[in-house]
Amino acid sequence: MGPVRRLSLVTDEVQGPMRERQAGALRVAIATQDMKELNAHFGSAKRFVIYDVTREEWNLVEAVAFDDVSDERGKHRTEGDDRIAPKVEALKGCHLLFCLAIGGPSAAKLVSAKIHPIKVRQPQSIQEVLLRTQMMLRTCPPPWLRKVLAEAGVAEKKPSFEEDD
């Protein structure tokens, strides 16, 4: 697989590979071909845009670009480099990944890296995905998202009803 390119906003700060997550934010990755829409399968995504999302705002963290991607026919090449591991590695630190489709082995690798994949039925704008994420944060999140939020330190874990005595 070719080199991974990371594109991020330039600031006066010296940054490592990925900026630290904003306090109280959920880090969200979106699979895209054009930087405008969620419109890619995980394996064939040329880019992932990564945002920190809170109930009030979202901020672009970076875009990660890949030169060598698989096609969307569901067939894997038998020769060549692993195209999944570099993507999972590039997304470490994210909590959610939105994509159009993802295979079982890829999903398992993401879950083991503590990244929750979310399949979306049809393409939609990146803004729609971010607004949907904010709505989930503002309202009563589903149980799977409450668990992700608790593990990310974004929401408090449910209190234990056991006595400390």
Image (cartoon, rainbow, N blue to C red):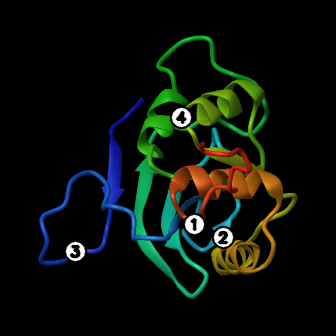
Between the residue at mark 3 and the residue at mark 1, the CA separation in whole angstroms equals 21 Å
User: Which three-letter amino acid code belongs to the residue tagged 2?
Assistant: Glu
Q: Earlier in the sequence, mark 3 or mark 1?
A: 3
The quarter of the picture where the C terminus appears is top right
Name the residue that disc number 3 marks.
10
Q: Are marks 3 and 4 in contact (CB under 8 Å)?
A: no
Kind of residue indicated by mark 1: Asp
SS for callout 4: loop
Residue 157 appears left or right of 18? right
Q: Compared to 151, does 73 lie above or below? A: above
Q: Looking at the rendering, in which quadrant would you find the N terminus? A: top left
Q: How many neighbours does mark 2 have within 10 angstroms: few (below 14), some (14-19), or many (20 or more)?
A: some
* In-front residue for pair 21/161: 161
Which of the two discs, 2 and 4, labels the residue nearer the N terminus? 2
Choose the circle earlier in sequence order: 4 or 1: 1
Q: Which residue is denoted by mark 1 in the rendering?
A: 34
Q: Are marks 3 and 1 in contact (CB under 8 Å)?
A: no
Q: Nearer the viewer, mark 2 or mark 3?
A: 3
Residue that appears at 42% across and 54% down: 64
**Marks 2/3: CA–CA distance:** 23 Å
Residue 53 lies in quadrant = bottom right
Marks 2/4: CA distance? 25 Å
Is 142 on the left or on the right of 34, as rendered? right
Disc 2 element: strand
List the residue tagged with mark 2.
37
Compare marks 2 and 3 and give the one earlier in the sequence: 3
At which x and y percent is residue 71?
Answer: 68, 37
Q: Secondary structure at mark 3?
A: loop
Pointer 4 residue = 113
